[in-house]
Image (cartoon, rainbow, N blue to C red):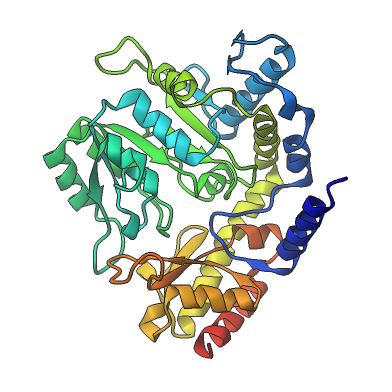
Amino acid sequence: MKDKQIKELIEREGERQKTAVNLIASENFASADTLDALGSVFTNKYAEGYPRGRYYGGNEVVDELEILCRKRALKLFNLSPKKWSVNVQPYSGSPANLAVYLGIVPKGGKIMGMTLEMGGHLTHGQKVSITGKIWKQIPYGVDKETERLDYEKIMSIAKKEKPFLIIAGATSYSRKIDFRKFRAIADEAGAYLMADISHIAGLIAGGAHPSPFPYADVVTTTTHKTLRGPRGALIFARKSEMRNSALSLADAVDKAVFPGIQGGPHMNQVAAIAVALEEAASPSFKKYAGQVMKNARVLADELKKKGWRIVSGGTDTHLFLVDTFEKGVSGKRASDKLEEAGIIVNKNVIPFDSRKPFDPSGIRVGTSAATTAGMKEKDMRAIAKRMDEILKHQ
């Protein structure tokens, strides 16, 4: 690389990633093949529109690429192309969620999602997000005692509020989500059901977590977390006709992505997603997904044995929350001290947190990247021991 300054920054970041223990739940390490596709000549092509319907010439190759990526996405999650469609163009998870709402929810309509402090995402209708400015969030959370979803209460809220769309999904909730129960809730309320599986898509693909596809109308996911691809997103939508519309859900989503909120897709990103999807279909990935779950359970259990309170008592996924403030250590200080020692986590609010998000009561811990780096149960025990030493003597 001729640009020495950028080359140096790339090398420094590469060294940081190699030497640090990455426990950021929303990060992973993409393969060399994925990175090759991301930096390929597809970067040069502007392909506004969809295959066989572009607004520019020279798209015969990228059309094949996008069609192949779609096929791989549907195959990975065992979906029939007669019943399901997938849009592979969203730039990332937030635009993907925004596109779903834009496509199927009337402006000002109600979307029911988990609140941020309980484990939800900004784009599930939070007021600081555009999703909370255009649509009205009907919030739900977790039970104060169990710190788990209370499906009966969620049902009660849904029946009362009658939201247009219910979102099942989270960004810092460590327990399995019962999509069957969410389907029953959506049916009772007369709502569409959207599953946001951005954090658990790789676990689902690897057979380590129940799938939402038998129950959801729309499913969104990022591609860079447990799916271990580039930063990007996918929107799966049923081809069934929308209520009071001649459009199918899939058509409405496609129109919302383009021309609704995006211009030309990043075809290099689509190529990299296609590579990651093929990798996720391999037997080794199934083994990887299982190991991610084992590592998370062991790490949470070991920290619990050392006296740290784990929110909801444990984990069923790749992540969990630690209530560090119970021992007088704020989430920010815990994150900072761990980073000084080469262990990377993120500060995070916990359910019913009395502290502010910039310096909350806990940290979020995830094992996807560490598992990609080859770590197993014995490493998790060693990491728990080191984390305990750092946080107790900070």
Q: Is residue 37 above or below residue 317?
A: above
Regarding residue 83, the answer to whether it shows in the image is no
Relative to residue 20, is residue 55 drawn left or right? left
The spot of residue 240 in percent (x, y) is 37, 18
- Considering every residue shown, the one lying at the far left of the view is 160
The spot of residue 46 in percent (x, y) is 66, 20
The spot of residue 92 in percent (x, y) is 53, 38
- Considering every residue shown, the one lying at the far right of the view is 2
Q: Residue at x 29, y 27 (%)?
A: 105
Relative to residue 212, is residue 72 drawn left or right? right
Q: Is residue 114 above or below residue 214?
A: below
Relative to residue 85, is residue 118 drawn left or right? left
Q: How many discs appear?
A: 0
Relative to residue 157, is residue 365 drawn left or right? right
Regarding residue 8, the answer to whether it shows in the image is yes
Q: Residue at x 73, y 11 (%)?
A: 58
Q: Residue at x 64, y 18 (%)?
A: 47
- Considering every residue shown, the one lying at the far bottom of the view is 393
Residue closer to the observer: 30 or 81:
30
Q: Is residue 364 above or below residue 161?
A: below
